[in-house]
Image (cartoon, helix red, strand yellow):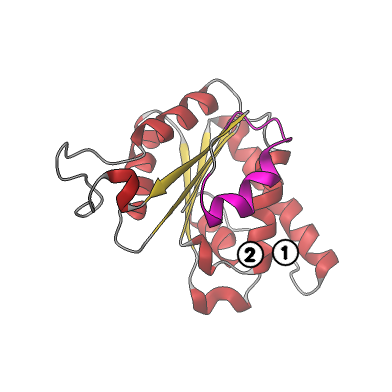
Amino acid sequence: GRVLADGQLAERWTSAFEDAKVGVVAFVPFDEAALGQRPVAGRHRLGQRVVGRDETADVLRQVRAGRGGVLLVEGEPGMGKSLLLAEASASARDQGFRVVSATAHGLDRVIPLCPLLVALSESGGLLVDIPTGNANSQMQAITAVREHIQGLADACPVLVTVDDVQFADPATLLALRLLPRQLSGRPVGWLLA
């Protein structure tokens, strides 16, 4: 795949995907220098265009072609990252994708894999009997999440979005590093902000 990286979040994540044969790995910087000026509610003032749409469209194309893709979005609060994920999710649904939308919350950090488990339960089946107590059980839980997403991808393309990833617990962060690589040959896309 191709890697476009800049910034602290991208540095932490792109190394996990560089050799993974994940279709598209891109990084969208959300800062004033990249935009020319601060966006209003996620929209560029001049063109009224959501920054990052081209990159999300690239990921969705890759996934429709049967290959995984990852898009990392970094920026200050209020720059439009959540709007970008919401618009990409709506576009994916319109194209027949199953969308799994997760949001990490600081208070959920005590529950391993909480954002992914909640999102998967809301999008097509409750995951039960997933142990999360120690490192071995967390790997079993990540495996169960992978198998669940694989099952979804057997029926149709899947888009997994995780907003506020900076608040995710360590097990969720590990899953987000492992699963895109492990599912790279499946129609599963990942948008992380």
Q: Is the residue marked by circle 1 packed among few (<14), some (14-19), or many (20+) residues within 10 Å?
A: some
**Residue nearer the viewer, 148 or 108:** 108
Q: Residue at x 29, y 44 (%)?
A: 35
Question: Residue 130 shows which numbered tag?
Answer: 1
The secondary structure type at the circle numbered 2 is loop
Residue 87, percent from left and from top: 32, 42
Front of the two marks 2 and 1: 2
Question: Which residue is at the far right?
Answer: 136
Cα distance between the residues tagged 2 and 1 = 10 Å
The secondary structure type at the circle numbered 1 is loop
Dot 1 amino acid type: Ile
Q: Quadrant of residue 108?
A: bottom right
Dot 2 amino acid type: Leu
Looking at marks 2 and 1 on the same chain, the residue that comes earlier in the sequence is marked by 2
Q: Is label 2 in contact with label 1 (beta carbons under 8 Å)?
A: yes
Report which residue position mark 2 lands on: 113
Residue range (magenta): 6-24
Q: Is residue 64 left or right of residue 112?
A: left
Q: Is the residue marked by circle 2 packed among few (<14), some (14-19), or many (20+) residues within 10 Å?
A: many
Q: Residue at x 31, y 41 (%)?
A: 51
Residue 89, percent from left and from top: 38, 42
